[in-house]
Amino acid sequence: METFFVKVKDGGNVQTALNIGEFGLAGLMVVASYFIIDIMLAGTTTGLPNGSMGVFYLLSIKV
């Protein structure tokens, strides 16, 4: 999916473009994961101290 977000102009730095694409998609994944985890785990994490947000925090740390 990163190839859709990476553009390099003539004479541009390829590594900079790849870094921007990678970090941009990592941010998009964190935002999308918040909504997916909140919807899918709502009310099913009664034994966890932080509920579904604990799962989200764990995922955020791993990114």
Image (tube, rainbow, N blue to C red):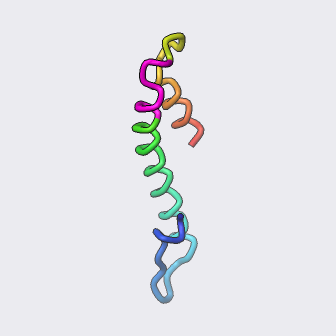
- Give the percent coordinates (x, y) of residue 34: 42, 37
Residue at (55% x, 35% y) in the render: 59
**From the image, which quarter does the C terminus lie in?**
top right
- Give the percent coordinates (x, y) of residue 36: 44, 38
The relative height of residue 25 versus residue 38 in the rendered view (above or below) is: below
Task: Spot the residue most to the bottom.
Answer: 10
The relative height of residue 27 versus residue 22 in the rendered view (above or below) is: above
- Give the percent coordinates (x, y) of residue 6: 49, 72
The relative height of residue 15 versus residue 43 in the rendered view (above or below) is: below
Q: Which residues are magenta?
A: 37-44
Residue at (47% x, 26% y) in the render: 41
Residue at (50% x, 12% y) in the render: 49
- Give the percent coordinates (x, y) of residue 44: 49, 19
**Left or right: 28, with 13 as reference point:** left
Question: Toward the viewer: 19 or 4?
Answer: 4
The relative height of residue 25 versus residue 30 in the rendered view (above or below) is: below
Q: How many marks?
A: 0
Residue at (46% x, 41% y) in the render: 33
| Residue 43 forms part of the magenta stretch | yes
